[in-house]
């Protein structure tokens, strides 16, 4: 007989938060390697940007299947595999001697690793193990942990690069990221003992048909596309943008750290507000505020102070889309297939990430400027604010025609 015992919320949040801290914290600093790595290897910025773009696309693609496996067999096995892939990908990134191998390791392998160690998998455990009344708040805590990881890890990565070299820094992180494996033991769900999945009312095919014919799911995917475009473009290319404008590399490191610090508060607040306010309105506000922040940043005279102010504001908005988006998915469709459905929405996010990071490198190499991509990010922010407003958050009524938003 299958166990109905649940993990304690404290255990789920502690282990889940530390896993996301490591996984998200390391990846947020990849932009710090753009210039030292490309200069040492004699590659272009587009070479580096393309590999990171593939990483984001691979993350989204593998995330769908990682979600399916986690829903079927539990998150534990997926997290262990993800930790191993992460270590191998970082080591391969350091030891690559040509752009093809670099794309396979920094792109495909690290993308697969992140699919198995970040939000979709961890949020599946939270959705199943945490009471629905506390779910949005708990997701905010986990997202805040990822933000704290950025605040914590980006300065560490900058120190490792400056103190030991870019290659040695990657190899050190390859060892460090294996800490995810022992933390995964804290997320072994009793209901998945022996590889048995809890009873589910729908098959995978039924769940997918229901979601993809439901307009609100499509709108959430469209909004998350924009989220990926904005944050990955800024995270990867802002250090080089600031250096091109004559600011020191330390300004970029501090800016990325500030994004992480303020996102601790932003994601926690978004998760908490999701228990009280309509999540679609929270999402619309976040996207519109991002567009306004980018516009003001480009308009104002550039200085370290303006960079730090921009980073602080963007930090409040950075991953704050994650808790309300995932909580809305759970609220509409339930938690049985949450990791898989979250993986599909995140795939849309990663298509946006691919375009944001690749276009940044492509257009810079051809125009010598990032301006066009900044303007695209503003326009997309306005678009995302508009498409989130019609989302219907009420639980779907199965066995009846799917309602259309009005």
Image (spheres, rainbow, N blue to C red):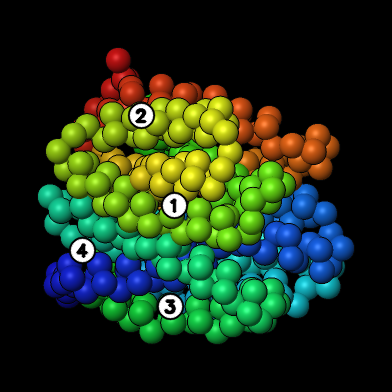
Q: Quadrant of residue 44?
A: bottom right
Q: Disc 4 and disc 3: Cα gap in Å?
A: 20 Å
- Tell me if 27 is positioned left or right of 137 in this view: right
Question: Which residue is labeled 3 in the image?
Answer: 180
Residue at image coords 14%, 56%: 131
Q: Earlier in the sequence, mark 4 or mark 3?
A: 4
Relative to 304, is 113 above or below? below
Which is nearer the N-term, disc 2 or disc 4? 4
- 3 vs 1, front mark: 1
C-alpha gap between disc 3 and disc 1: 23 Å
- Secondary-structure class at tag 4: helix
- Residue 100, x across and y down, in percent: 81, 63
Q: Which residue is mark 4?
A: 129
Which of the two discs, 3 and 1, labels the residue nearer the N terminus?
3
Measure how far apart labels 2 and 3 are at the Cα level: 34 Å
Picture residue at 44% right of the left edge, 82% below the top: 179
The residue at which mark 1 appears reads as 259
Name the quadrant of the C terminus: top left
Tell me the tag on residue 84: none
Which residue is at the front of the view, 296 or 260? Answer: 296
Residue drawn at (22%, 32%), measured in percent from left and top? 278
| Separation of marks 2 and 1 at Cα, in angstroms | 20 Å
Q: Residues within 10 Å of mark 4 (few under 14, many from 20)?
A: some
Say the numbered circle drawn on residue 284: 2
């Amino acid at each position: 007989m299958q166990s109905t015992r649940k993990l304690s919320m404290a255990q789920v949040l502690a282990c889940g938060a530390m896993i996301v801290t490591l996984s998200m914290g390391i990846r947020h600093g990849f932009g710090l390697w753009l210039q030292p790595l490309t200069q040492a290897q004699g590659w272009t910025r587009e070479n580096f940007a393309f590999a990171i773009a593939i990483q984001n696309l691979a993350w989204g693609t593998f995330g769908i299947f990682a979600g399916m496996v986690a829903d079927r067999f539990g998150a534990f096995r997926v997290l262990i595999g993800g930790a191993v892939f992460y270590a191998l990908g970082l080591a391969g990134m350091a030891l690559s001697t040509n752009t093809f191998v670099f794309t396979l390791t920094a792109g495909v392998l690290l993308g697969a690793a992140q699919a198995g160690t970040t939000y979709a998998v961890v949020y599946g455990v939270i959705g199943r193990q945490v009471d629905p009344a506390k779910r949005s708040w708990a997701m905010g805590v986990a997202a805040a942990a990822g933000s704290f990881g950025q605040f914590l890890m980006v300065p560490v990565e900058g120190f490792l690069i400056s103190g030991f070299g870019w290659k040695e820094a990657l190899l050190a992180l390859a060892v460090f990221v294996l800490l995810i494996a022992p933390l995964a033991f804290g997320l072994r769900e009793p209901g998945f003992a022996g590889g048995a999945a809890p009873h589910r009312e729908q098959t995978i095919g039924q769940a997918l048909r229901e979601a993809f014919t439901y307009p609100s799911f499509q709108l959430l995917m469209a909004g998350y596309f924009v989220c990926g475009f904005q944050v990955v473009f800024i995270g990867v290319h802002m250090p080089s943008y600031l250096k091109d404008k004559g600011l020191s590399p330390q300004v970029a490191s501090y800016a990325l750290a500030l994004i992480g610090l303020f996102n601790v508060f932003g994601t926690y607040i978004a998760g908490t507000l999701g228990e009280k306010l309509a999540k679609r309105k929270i999402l619309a506000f976040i996207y519109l505020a991002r567009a306004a922040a980018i516009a003001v940043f480009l308009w104002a005279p550039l200085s370290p102070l303006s960079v730090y102010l921009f980073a602080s504001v963007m930090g409040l908005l950075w991953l704050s889309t994650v808790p309300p988006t995932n909580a809305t998915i759970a609220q509409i469709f339930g938690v049985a297939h949450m990791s898989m459905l979250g993986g599909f929405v995140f795939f849309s996010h990663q298509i946006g990430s691919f375009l944001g990071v690749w276009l940044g490198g492509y257009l810079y190499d051809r125009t010598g400027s990032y301006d066009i991509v900044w303007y695209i990010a503003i326009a997309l922010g306005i678009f995302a604010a508009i498409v989130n407003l019609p989302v219907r958050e009420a639980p779907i009524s199965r066995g009846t025609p799917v309602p259309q938003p009005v």
